[in-house]
Amino acid sequence: VDLGYDGLLSATGGTKANIYFHDLRNTAILLGAYKDAHTEEITRVRFHSHSLLSASEDGLVALFDTTQPNEELATKSVLNIGTPLRQIGFFGPNFEGVFCLTGSETLSVWHHDSAQRICDFGSDIRTTLSQLSGQTIHYLVDCHWDSTHNRLYLLAGDHSGCGSVFLVEAGL
């Protein structure tokens, strides 16, 4: 679930690969749904302004312009990450980037309008991060965009609950 339009619109991903929209002023009425972008369970949805990202177990991230009247017109790009997704989000000075964290503990960053991968940090990212931090990294948690300093950060951790924050050189 994520909220857009100043908290008035909710987007909810479902187990049937659908994204549902509700006006939070009257949640009894379904405003609409996107049903064609994904083939498996929706794992994350994220708003930024009028744009909505969706991620799925099918390994795809879809970008929608929610000002458009239907799903076909709203679909702006689809990114094929190739493995089930756990976290996604916008980043960049104009929020033109998308970060993608997968269930197999990988990180990639993309330019959403062109659907081009900027960087894939590979399956050995945890080894690299472990060497940098001196701590064993078992999993990737999330990314955070610091708009004040124009930096993308990655939070990663170990099984004992310790976490580390890393600067991501995304190349945007």
Image (spheres, rainbow, N blue to C red):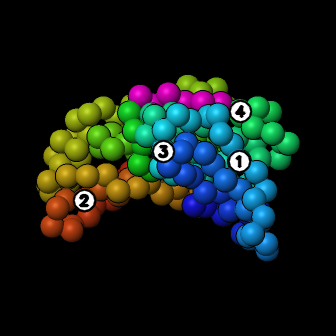
Give the residue at x 16% y 46%. 131
Label 3–label 1 contact, CB within 8 A: no
Question: Disc 1 on helix, strand or loop?
Answer: strand
Q: Earlier in the sequence, mark 3 or mark 1?
A: 1
Q: Is residue 78 magenta?
A: yes
Which is closer to the viewer, label 2 or label 4? 4
Q: Earlier in the sequence, mark 2 or mark 3?
A: 3
Task: Classify mark 3: residues with Cα within 10 Å, few (<14), some (14-19) or many (20+).
Answer: some
Label 1–label 2 contact, CB within 8 A: no
CA–CA distance in space, label 2 to label 3: 26 Å
Location of mark 4 (residue):
76
Label 4–label 3 contact, CB within 8 A: no
Q: How many marks?
A: 4
Q: Earlier in the sequence, mark 1 or mark 2?
A: 1
Location of mark 2 (residue):
157
Comparing 3 with 169, the one in front is: 3
Which is closer to the viewer, label 1 or label 2? 1
Q: Earlier in the sequence, mark 2 or mark 4?
A: 4
Location of mark 3 (residue):
41
CA–CA distance in space, label 1 to label 2: 36 Å
Residue 158: quadrant of the picture: bottom left
Q: In the figure, is residue 163 to the left or right of 151?
A: left
Give the residue at x 60% y 45%. 18
CA–CA distance in space, label 4 to label 1: 16 Å
x, y (%) of residue 59? Answer: 45, 34
Which is closer to the viewer, label 4 or label 1? 1
Mark 2: amino acid: Gly
Look at the image and give the residue range highlighted in magenta.
77-82
CA–CA distance in space, label 3 to label 1: 14 Å
Q: Quadrant of the C terminus?
A: top right
Question: Disc 3 on helix, strand or loop?
Answer: loop
